[in-house]
Amino acid sequence: MRPHLPLISSHQGGRSALTCRFRCGDACFHEAPNTSGNPYFGEVLAGALSRRAVLGTAAVVTLASAAGASVLPAPEARAAGGGSGHGTRPGDGAKGLRFTPVPPNTADRVTVPPGYRQNIVIRWGEPILRGAPAFDAERQSARAQARQFGYNNDFLSLLPLERERGVAARRQILVANHEYTDEVLMFRGYDPDAPTREQVEIAWAAHGLSVVVVEEDRGTGALTPVPRHALNRRLTATSEFLLTGPAAGSELLRTSADRTGSRVRGTLNNCAGGTTPWGTTLHGEENFNQYFAHASSATDRRYGIGTGASERKWERFDPRFDVSREPNEPHRFGWVVELDPYDPDFTPRKRTALGRFKHEAAQPRLTADGRAVVYMGDDEKFDYLYKFVSSRRMRAGGGRAARAHNRTLLDEGTLYVAKLTGDSPAAEIDGSGKPPADGEFDGSGTWVPLATGDTSHVPGMSAEEVYVFTRLAGDRVGATKMDRPEDVEPSPRTGRVYVALTNNTDRGASGKAPADEANPRAANKHGHVLELAEYGDDPAAEGFAWRLFLVAGDPEDPATYFAGFPKERVSPVSCPDNVAFDPHGNLWISTDGARLGSHDGLFGVATAGERRGELKQFLTMPKGAETCGPVIQERRVLVAVQHPGEVDGASVEKPASVWPDGEGRVVRPSVVAVWREDGGAIGV
């Protein structure tokens, strides 16, 4: 029988107030910026396709296998056999998920399955550039930090490195985002009302991106950094970036320091990202609004910039963070940044054709004819899901001309926003989580074009306005308000796209958007994962089918769903955030702010076959930490342990965690590698 989905019960836990304060400027405690009146479209769909027509016959996606191509099963498919998800044997599970699940816990460490080992790859402050001193928390300086690994690592990418002196097989390029700084955990005696210039400049240097070559120890499987490698690089809140694409040079992007509207100092709040087929990395600027002060309704334009002083008081030391003095400076953040890790001389680009909003991530794929398609989520309550389709095609080969061409693909194309339609009447979606009469939360969708090059498709807005004020453009065309769309990843095997919707406790509240079929729970504290299939298996299609793949929470709660897999055989999961795929086609989910009484973790879930929906926890985080990254290779899992010890009341003097170096040492965000003790493939 299908599970019924009544209103979820209350759980303790979730993000600390300290995390909300420093990571996103208490975004969840302010009025959601989206106050538009976009309707629910379930009532206006005439002749809606049935669930089987939408995600079966009309949108068939094939899965290559050794035995040939097979169609993904319908969601009601069940796995054979019995047993408990919390006690499965290491050899039991979908290929890639054959490990003993880690039980929910609150241990102050990274907990991994039996038979697996781990090492800390790199910590905040470790030297990576020439001239960088060893980390000393009591004597940190801005100059040192600009040459050391940054703070609060989030997105990770591991790229192959060509052979050099016979060690290439053991070396890769690690690229990491540094989302934000947590000054009370960085500086002893930190006074939030009176930060010093040195503290502010250290924080500027701790933001941004790191590129560092890492090497595998073949004897143990551990990864360690290669200090002072020629490709190692730091980009900070003061490094030079270029604005490119159709909005570059716009009056909306010009400031007193940059009359051209094309050169920006710094990148801020880089959250998740993506790796392109042409070997570059993409980095989403997310909660940039919190760094700016003294905005007004005229200068904010829907992005949540405060009218008073900022949390970190940066405006006291640099006028560009004072919106009353530099009203266009915030317009130069909130973009997708493209970086070439193989070229230390390449100035990173902020790609305006991909729109400006709170980018959680940007994951590309290619169409059959070689055009780039990038999926993006806007991480805010009631904001939107986007995609971009390039006009030009990727050139194959690794030559200089091909590389130069491919690094311009994201400057020309069409930007779209998603409008999702449920196939059930609105009256059947009551916010309780009870499925509609057809037994499935599903429907169809449309990618609504917003702009192509210099041409706007939004009435009353120029193309430049669409790119700079993309949220307003989404409002005008009636995009579907979602429950914090974060990472969006297409499966490299099936082409299906998976959207992590972390949570939205304001869903259905008085004066807020009600539940709809794509966001069916009021007061949604645990989030869900949406699965969509582009029509004709064409990433450039302007229509798609969708259904909910996971409805997160405690499996014992009726208001949860795991793609039809028996719920007594799955791990509890809450607040999906970053997602990635392993070589077997399984989706791996990292969580942020889990509300089930356990620490955040990393989970693998089968997306196809008779075990579709089988979800198993692979690791858990230390106290106060969020799971980020992740990278899932055949023989290694890499995760970023972000903001360990970020617990209310914690400080350098009163740490809430002793990870990673033990008592008496400052808590340090770090990157962790996990591998099998016997050197075998992960989960096989």
Image (tube, grey):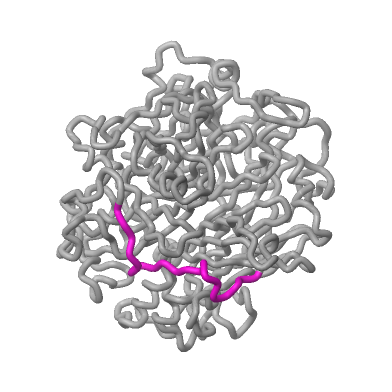
Q: Is residue 92 left or right of residue 449?
A: right
Q: Position of residue 32 (x, y in %)?
A: 33, 48
Q: Is residue 26 visible?
A: yes
Q: 348 or 644: nearer the eye?
A: 348
Residue 413 shown left or right of residue 136 in the figure? left
Residue at 48% across, 70% down: 150
Q: Position of residue 671 (x, y in %)?
A: 59, 66
Taking the spot 43% from the left edge, 33% from the top edge, the residue there is: 515
Q: Nearer the viewer, residue 313 or 270?
A: 270
Q: Does residue 227 lie above or below 555 as drawn?
A: below
Residue 304 percent location from the top left of the image:
29, 53
Q: Measuring 58% from the left and 83% from the top, which residue is drawn there? A: 665
- Quadrant position of the N terminus in the picture: top right
Q: How many marks?
A: 0
In magenta, the rendered stretch is 224-243
Q: Quadrant of residue 18?
A: bottom left
| Residue 285, placed above or below residue 218 | above
Q: Is residue 575 visible?
A: no
Residue 429 placed where, x, y %?
47, 27
| Residue 367 falls inside the magenta stretch | no
Above or below 254: residue 5:
above
Is residue 565 toward the left or the right of residue 331 in the image? Answer: right
Give the residue furthest to the top.
47
Residue lying furthest bottom in this view?
A: 139
In front of the other: 632 or 224: 224
* Residue at 79% in and 47% down: 684
